[in-house]
Amino acid sequence: MPILQESQAIPKNIVRIQAGIWGFVLAAFSGLMLFAMTAWLLIKGGQSVGEHLSLLGNYFPGYSVSWSGSFVGMFYGMLIGGIAGWAIGLIYNKVVDWRIRGK
Amino acid sequence: MDKTTKNNRPTVIIGAGPAGLTAGYELSKFSENAVILEADHTVGGISRTVSYRGYRFDIGGHRFFSKVPYINELWQEILPEGFLLRPRLSRIHYQGHFFDYPLKVTNALAGLGLVEALLVCFSYSKAKLLPSAEDDNFEQWIANRFGHRLYRIFFKTYTEKVWGMPCHTISADWAAQRIKNLSLREALYNAIFNNGHTRKGKLITSLIEQFHYPRLGPGMMWENCKTVLARKNSPTVFGERVTGIRHKSGFVECISSQNQAGEKTQYDGSNYVSSMSLKELILGLDPPPPDQVLQAAKSLRYRDYLTVVLVVNRENIFPDNWIYVHTPEVKLGRVQNYKNWSPEMVPDSCKTALGLEYFLWEQDEEWRWPDERLIETGIRECAQIGLIQPEEVEDGTVVRMKKAYPVYDQNYHRSLQIIRQYLARFTNLQTIGRNGLHRYNNQDHSMLTGVYAARNIMGEKHDLWSVNTEKEYHENGILQGETQSGGDRLVPVGGPPESSSLPVSALESTNAAGRQQILEEAFALLDPLALGLAVGLVCGFGLFLAGVLLLLKGGETVGPNLSLLRHFLPGFTVSWPGVFLGFVEAGVGGFVLGNIAARLRNGLMFAYAGIVRRRAEAEENPDILDKI
Ligand SMILES: Cc1cc2nc3c(=O)[nH]c(=O)nc-3n(C[C@H](O)[C@H](O)[C@H](O)COP(=O)(O)OP(=O)(O)OC[C@H]3O[C@@H](n4cnc5c(N)ncnc54)[C@H](O)[C@@H]3O)c2cc1C
């Protein structure tokens, strides 16, 4: 009875990503991150607050490093994160399907 | 097998050990008579209790514990009063030190001394980090789990004393049957659904910490059983060694036995159930079987056992039930203190009876030594390891037990297959028990084969050979509640018996299937290529989109800040060719990231799963020495 190689013994299914859940998780993560980053810069204060972060306004209309902007940023962060997570899930599942069908 | 045996011929059972007596007992429940032929002058076989001047002792101390509910019921039924629940205490003697067994880390390290403890830790860590790829014999199995040093100290010498052969030659089957080799799947299942414990692990722990024991030793159980059977018209005939089995066309016609005076008697039965050794049975067949079968039977080997019992004039010698003697300087393998099994095992509470256990081959010269010489040796070795002073010994006796252990050597499996195939032709002969199946069974599994043989006679269909094997039958009968895979257990085929069993409910099996699915999903692998591609595409496209947006917006200097990414993505600029280059470069970066993330997650999961399995195995096998 040869030793069980861990990789041999483990259930061998390939996981399918739930695109919706990934989207939700990444949305929550990036939305909160952007909110927290903006809020942190505001709390820190200084002469020119969030000079670089405010450049995101180029992409996110209405975003600025301000308290109202932090909520706008949270919205955009969630939107982008959600789309990215969902897209990763979708693409991953498609690739897995192709690969399994190919085998 | 005939559905009914209602004729005037009883079932003839060979051997009044636990298996034979249980077969008779089970038959009596169906009002079937049996006659039990016993070569010896006492019941119980290896599970007998010998009495010497009022001092009682076993052939090695017999704990009553079973995971088979029906057997527990039978024990209570046969011996309704008389069971004691005893705490278990046992230690290992090694080089002048006593170590708790099952092993406790602090106690073991303290006993070994600083240098040895460090070496042990080192070898243990090595085993954990770099286990051998082989796991197919006892030496490798232990060394892979405890390290080579602990193996040498705590397992090697004792195992070799018991089996008389080097550990690396002990067959994988032995480890598989006696030592639970947990499947990773099972371990993970327990980790998730049973709070990290194996269901059996918990049960095993409690079975190890205490055990049942008849007040006057196991012989008390078998004496009672014999008496009950005699009352039910199923007598036990002593001093009758079965020597011949006459058969024709797959049917046993009669058997003949011989008593000590050499007188022969013939017994006619409707069915025959044999717990005598397979070797003896095959060699006794008339006409003899084909040469290949004879050779197979001749190749079966048995380890013999001898106990020297010393009556010591001291009230308390040590608190343990037994002590494993690993010290290589003495031949002594184990010391039993029968008073600690039950106070009634000694007639005088101021004295102690020690059972010194020696494991030998019949061919060894020690086997033929006169009792006096064996007693002298016992006293000397016992004093040498510091248990007694020679002058404290008042009396002593010796009991020899041939064929105490069926040997699992490299050939036994093949031989057994040949014999089993040959015996399958007999419609009215079944073999049961430890030596009748050449299986390293405890009482419970030996008894269970007796139960099944009786039920087969009554028309049920059970495969006696699969009792206490690793085969994965789903038991919904006698073993209710014992449904997970495991080594030290019985796994019969067959329909539900009439009593003490309920089928596993549909709900339970649906739950099990659901849990299995959760397990499959939770531990499914992430495909590194797919995750790499997905993350790569999203990153690449994200950067591409960011660049394109700026380009479309236009202005004097387009995207001076985004262009800073060129520090990480060589050649990247916010220009039309630049965004395509950025797409490729960010795509490659994302691919690497996603791929590594998937591999890391899979690796961590393997590592976690490995730890869970080893922990669960350790939990299920804290008593490996007991199984040797
Ligand atoms: C050292 C030691 C410690 C053990 N400890 C435990 C323990 O703690 N717990 C536990 O449950 N089990 C223990 N066991 C195992 C237990 O003893 C056996 O499983 C059990 O006795 C087997 O029962 P059996 O009926 O199959 O065989 P046996 O006990 O061997 O009985 C067979 C009977 O058949 C008779 N016989 C043989 N040949 C013939 C013949 N030709 N004609 C007529 N009669 C014949 C024999 O004399 C014997 O009485 C231990 C065994 C040993 C050796």
Image (tube, coloured by chain):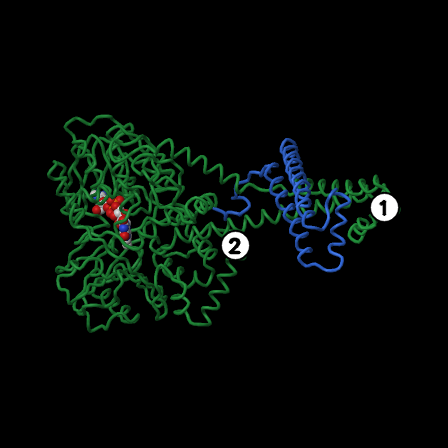
Chain colours: A blue, B green
Can you tell which quarter of the image residue A50 is in?
Answer: bottom right
Query: Relative to residue A98, is residue B56 drawn left or right?
Result: left
Q: Which mark is residue B253?
A: none
Q: Nearer the viewer, residue B399 or B444?
A: B444
Q: Secondary structure at mark 2?
A: loop
- Which residue, as the protein is rendered here, is positioned at the far right? B556
Q: Residue at x 20, y 33 (%)?
A: B254
Q: Are marks 2 and 1 on the same chain?
A: yes
User: In the image, is residue B321 above or below residue A86?
Assistant: below
Q: Nearer the viewer, residue B132 or B599?
A: B599
Q: Residue at x 46, y 63 (%)?
A: B149
Identify the chain of the residue marked 2, using the numbered disc in the image.
B
Nearer to the camera, B548 or B463 = B548
**Label 2 neighbourhood size at 10 Å, few (<14), some (14-19), many (20+)?**
some
**Neighbour class for label 1 at 10 Å: few (<14), some, many (≥20)?**
some
The kind of secondary structure element at disc 1 is loop
Quadrant into which the N terminus of chain B falls: top left
**Occupied quadrant, residue B417:** top left
Residue located beneath label 1 in the image = B558
Q: Using the image as rendered, state which of residue B101 and residue B448 is in the foreground.
A: B101
Amino acid at pointer 1 = Val
Amino acid tagged 2: Ser
Q: Which residue is mark 2?
A: B132
Image coords of residue B146 (percent x, y) = 45, 58
- Find residue B145 and report its horizontal and vertical position in percent: 46, 56
Which chain letter matches label 1? Answer: B
Task: Classify the position of the C terminus of chain B by image quarter.
Answer: bottom left
Residue B403 visible in the picture: no
Q: Is residue B8 left or right of residue B420?
A: left
Q: Looking at the image, is mark 2 or mark 1 earlier in the sequence?
A: 2
Marks counted in the figure total: 2
- Residue B304: image quadrant is bottom left
